[in-house]
Amino acid sequence: MPGLHKIPDQTERNRLKEIGLRARKTDVGYVVTIGVILTVNGDIFLQQADRNSNNFSWTYGTGLLLTSSMRRLSGKNIKCPNVSLSQKPLPLTVLVSFPGSGNTWTRHLLEQMTGIATGSDFFDKKLEAGGFIGEKKMDTSTIAVKTHDLYKPLSGKPLRGIKRAILIIRNPYKAMVADFNREQSKNHVGTVSLPYFIKGWKRYLAGWTNRWLQLNHNWITLMDNLHVIFYENLVSHLERELTRLYSFLDDGSIHGNVQCALRNTEGNFHRNRSKELPISFFYNEDDVRLVNSHIDKVSILLKKYNHSFFDISSYKL
């Protein structure tokens, strides 16, 4: 197995026994019959792949668990502060995305990771009631300000004095369905029934299909200090992506910890997708042809401006 350097030594096996773990040797390392492991460096890991079983493989390398189905939760002594506005001015940062791309979720992760509130250029009472205390703020007391607007530096839009930007890109087919659900249900986690789609979906597509291309093209080409996050990477490689994001934001003015976000990943505004129809259901051949062409254009831009950390051609239907 790539990355393996050694199996646990006797000292580490003794530590397993001290916290009540039983280990037996396998071809890939050890299997322990409990869901949590304490490693030599004091980090805690949780097995997530099989909720119906407490058995899982424990592989070892450079002091870390390497099994891809495990996620580190926290260190023993990490203290995560309550979210508040910054008492000192921070570089004005915007968190921009096409609607339905995970902006609200990313705001939650940012706040948990840094302990600093996010703002928004559009006031949403439901988000404020749900815990986003900086919802009315559009200034340097926030770690980032949410926007779905285009970047127009000469006119100072969406804000004047922007120093850096975080752009979230998501599969446009899925983003548009998610945004339509939010718009029609008037709820960030709501879904609507088929009659609503039949009534308003084509009108929505006519107004928003080109916007995904326009917004991403705008920010990629005009904002120099830009960090691109792909929603799909956040879902599948959360810790890695948060570490990259923290590195982008860390200019010495923040004192956060990625592990604080990993303790509370969901937040209060994550939609339940268990009953959603296949994405292809909502798009005809003409729609697919147009959206696929937009994906190709943004893919070229991402490569040109060195932001191609994810192959968005996988978005295409």
Image (cartoon, grey):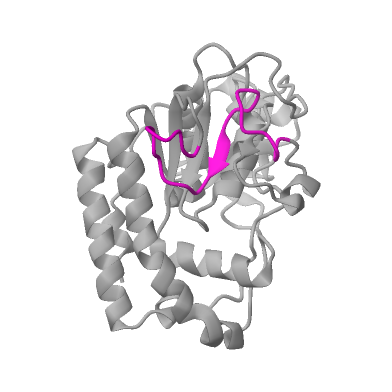
Name the one closer to the observer, 16 or 68. 68
- Please report the residue visible at 62 percent of the width from the left and 30 percent of the height from the top: 113
Image height check: is 235 above or below 139?
Answer: below
Q: Which residue is drawn at 40% across and 59% down?
A: 171
Q: In which quadrant of the rendered view does residue 183 lie?
A: bottom right
Towards the viewer: 304 or 120: 120
Where is residue 17 drawn, in percent x and y?
Answer: 71, 30
Residue 34 lies in the magenta-colored region: no
Q: How many labels does the image show?
A: 0
Which segment is the magenta one?
A: 134-158
Placement of the C terminus among the 4 image quadrants: bottom left
Does 83 sit above or below residue 178? above
Say if residue 62 shows up in the picture: no
Q: Residue furthest right?
A: 129
* Residue at 57% in and 32% down: 144
Residue 78 percent coordinates (x, y): 71, 21
Q: Is residue 135 on the magenta stretch?
A: yes
Q: Nearer the viewer, residue 229 or 144?
A: 144
Relative image position of residue 75 (x, y in whole percent): 66, 24
Q: Where is residue 16 in the image (x, y as percent from the top left)?
A: 67, 30
What quarter of the picture does the N terminus occupy? top left
Q: In which quarter of the image is residue 213?
A: bottom left
Q: In this view, does 167 lie above or below 285?
A: above
Q: Mark yes or no: residue 205 visible.
A: yes
Predominant SS of the magenta segment: loop
Left or right: 41 with respect to 207? Answer: right
**Viewer-proximal residue among 95 and 9:** 95
Which residue, as the protein is rendered here, is positioned at the far front?
155
As drawn, is 301 to the left or to the right of 249?
A: left
Q: Residue at x 54, y 51 (%)?
A: 102
